[in-house]
Image (cartoon, rainbow, N blue to C red):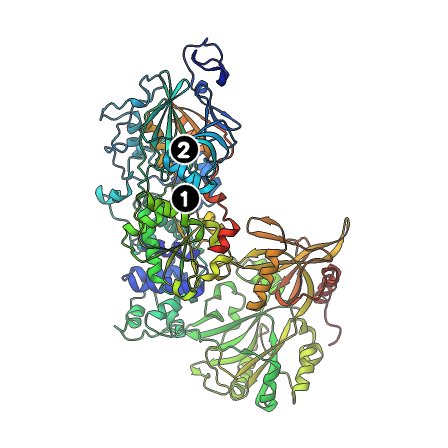
Amino acid sequence: MNRFAELLDRLAYEPGRNNKLKLLTAYLRDTEDPDRGYALAALTGALSFKHAKPGLIRDLIMERTDPVLFGLSYDYVGDLSETVALMWPKHSVNHDESFRGYPPPQPSPTRGEGAQRNSAQPSRTNHAAAASALSAPSPLVGEGQGGGYRRLNSQHESRPRNLHNNPPPPTLTEVVTRLRTLGKTELPAQLARWLDELDETGRWALLKLVTGAMRIGISARLAKTAAAALGDKDPHEIELMWPGLAPPYLDLFGWLEGRAEKPINREPAPFRPVMLAHAIEDADFAGLDPADFIAEWKWDGIRVQAVSGRDERGNLQVRLYSRSGEDITKSFPDLLPSLHLPGAIDGELLVLRDGRVQTFNVLQQRLNRKVVSPKLLKDYPIHLRAYDLLGDDENDLRELPFEERRAHLESFIKKLADPRIDLSPTVPFTNWAALTAARADPAGAGAGWDAEAVEGVMLKRRDAPYLPGRPKGQWWKWKRDPHIIDAVLMYAQRGHGKRSSYYSDYTFGVWTNGDDGDELVPVGKAYFGFTDEELLQIDRFVRRNTTEKFGPVRHVVHEPDQGLVLEVAFEGLARSTRHKSGVAMRFPRINRLRWDKPPREADRLETLARMLKAETQVPSRV
Amino acid sequence: MHGSSPRMTAKNGAKPAYIFRMRPQDILLPVAAGLCCKPGGFHIDPVRPVERAVITHGHSDHARAGHGAVLATQETLDMMRLRYGDGFAGSTQAIRYGEEIRLGDVTVKFHPAGHVLGSAQIAVSCQDLCIVASGDYKDAGDPTCAPFELVPCDVFITEATFGLPVFRHGNAADEVKKLLASVALFPERAHLVGAYSLGKAQRVIALLREAGYDAPIYLHGAMEKITRYYESRGSALGDLRAVRGMKKAELAGTITLAPPTATSDIWTRRFPDPVTAFASGWMRVRARARQRGVELPLVISDHADWDGLTATIGATGAGEVWVTHGQEDALVHWCRSRGLAARPLDLVGYGDEEETEVVIEGEESGA
């Protein structure tokens, strides 16, 4: 458990993806079965046991600490699990060791001999007695080994638990297997025992694990990628077999280390690695023949794979996967009954109201929900718009050319005959000019009322098989031009990881009428879009034009005649009560640096307000 | 303040002696300039220029320039000279650990505080009352300075930098192992260890050497002088090199020590994909580490942790405890719950040196 805790601890601080991978792979390589399997399960969210409530943890610590000291500590640390992990009293204290060889004298304000006194009295004092009373919970002795007879010389220190015949700290396997079978009433005592046995980091990880609050910034996908690296395998292979695997994944590790056969996925509704598109550049068109391609709208929703298949007993199982293969079935129960024929659809999740596709802002209300309330289902009805068919019952269609798959898809959707699932229409065109016109005006080119949810067009080669990843030249995405405004740089903050020495996070604002004439109001934050060279230039500008510093944030000069204008590109706008300006941008990035433009000529809030109006209105043409 | 001894000189603003029994506050009293010893005619670690200063250790919030006369250990005086130049005080007097000096009506004796090289607790005795001003101290082992010595006393003045039960620093050698494990795992990256340049940096280096790390260790320019001084006082720190002038690729797989503020500045761009570590007791609390953008927190402190503070207070046998700079509330509460008289001193001007250390621009660019 302590080893796993160390990994979690390190991952929590490491910002770089590749470095996280390295840490994970090293852990999986160096840790034995079945511990590493349970770790992989914990990291991929595949563990299930009843979580402990924070109240239980609080009760445990209150029995052992002074409430005032706990209160002050909790205020300071700000996190219950961490506070408890840090102040949990240690048990194995050597009560017979005195303070660096000095016998503790009797507390007394009336001694006469001052600093010279050094009587040798090896007996225990009040102080030592108080320390030895630690095992009996009392509000006065809870702050740790208040007596503190320990350590004092790090070179000669050995871990007390090894000296005192204490049980070794639990392994992750013990913790996980015990948690699964433990009765509710047994949990507090078991937790307390483990907390006694673990070190600070171990206690922290244990508490995060049992309260189900393990947020360490890594995805299930990353953990699987790290596992794949053990055997130099493609993470897609693990993704494919994953639904058929169970902790502690002995068969998986056996295969990865070349000791066993590849595990077979018996999952009736498996995920298939997703095919992705390249962004098209103007220069690319010259080499492409319009006749080779089929175009369709690129919908601004969530790309998903909806799979249904029969299990051994012939029952239909339905799964919904994100494009990275994460199982998101539970978040969309309203779609599942519609997937009543075995097959695998590649499509886009959208919210439809009265037959009309809503913007991404609306769809967002349905994402990352743990609890899906009936009201949410009713107010945000989910819909699947189908792009492709990867499997039809038992038949794998991925080897077929896109054009043929499209024909299969059309008949499959027809057979489904469900109002929640429809076909993404193709966009007819004969030359690039026609497609350019369609992209510029989706409403007029067939998207009609749904045009606002179109974020561009997709170009797919008629003869392209369905290939995992982002194969060259098969699929292209041609996004709608972003919205552009000129804003003024107001504040800059240091980045993380590689960028920790650069001011790379920028808050920018536009002009509005203030109490004393025009003033800048922040409208967004961006931390990418610029080139490395531009980053250096902005960083230099920030350092030379800082007017104030607030911790890591620099206040950068932004006067009508002094400051830096940033051309900001963004995908959409939404009303926001969280921002002073009342608007929130979607996907803002720095498009260009306008060194040529004085800040007074930057855009105004009214411009954004007009865009916002346009966003929420229906298109004028059908 | 009332009363004093009959032998008080006029210079010290003597008053006739009416009161026979000294109270602790008659000996030491917090004033704006710091802790004032009226019967002895001096201040301890004064934050403003005074006529006579007795100084516990060389950190800049305790040892300031501009006093008339300074009494401190030779190491502390040397460090002040390194930092402020030759004219940092009107006159200086060095005192050894265990040496006793009479100042006015009190005697002053220096004892090792285990905080940094030359750091001392100052025992001030008058009549039969002994007060120990411990300055900053730690009870954990440190190869670069004399170990903390317990001084029995009536009144113990303790710091409270880590005066909350969540601060338990553990074994510094284990933290250094963590650093070395990271160096082994990421041989293509540089490891940049933020450490206060007086004391912490040298301790980290010494711990690395104890752990068997014998490769060159690189130094930020701001810590070269003080580290060389440590070496001149007998710390064996192995092969140390200036990081200045090194090529980026050469720094892969190496360890460099730098002042904490430098680890998130332009200066770091000379390193290949640096892992930012920070050696500090504050690293015990995650929010603090994250706030600073630290990737590898190392819980290594030059201050006593909660267990160290409480153990020391108990072991001195003091019936009264004065608590200064840090988390006074919790420690005062703990003392009182143990039946000890305790109060916060509310001295201003002392902080955590790691939070305040500033790299001088010139040193930064030259480093």
Residue at 51% across / 48% down in the picture? Answer: B360
Residue B300: x and y in percent read 37, 46
**Residue neighbourhood size for the residue with mark 1, other residues' Cα within 10 Å, grouped as few (<14), some (14–19), many (≥20):** many
The label number, if any, that marks residue B63 in the structure image: none
Q: Position of residue B271 (x, y in %)?
A: 44, 61
Q: Are marks 2 and 1 in contact (CB under 8 Å)?
A: no
Image coordinates of residue A464 in percent, x first then y, are 50, 86
Q: Is residue B207 visible?
A: yes
User: What is the number of the mark on residue B198?
Assistant: 1
Mark 2 chain: B
Above or below, A473 against A511 in this view is: below
Closer to the camera, A139 or B285?
B285
Q: Residue furthest right?
A: A517
Which residue type does callout 1 highlight?
Leu
Q: Nearer the viewer, residue A208 or B257?
A: B257
- Circle 2 sits in a helix, a strand or a loop, which is it? loop
Label 2, residues with CA under 10 Å away: few <14, some 14-19, many ≥20: many
Chain letter of the residue beneath label 1 in the structure image: B
The residue that appears at 37% across and 45% down in the rendered structure is B229
Q: Are marks 2 and 1 on the same chain?
A: yes
Q: Residue B285 or B79: which is nearer the viewer?
A: B79
Measure the alpha-carbon separation of dots 2 and 1: 14 Å
Q: Secondary structure at mark 1?
A: loop
Q: Position of residue B200 (x, y in %)?
A: 39, 45
| Quarter of the view holding residue A315 | bottom left
Viewer-side residue, A351 vs A590 = A590
Q: Which residue is mark 2?
A: B56
Residue B341 sits in quarter: top left
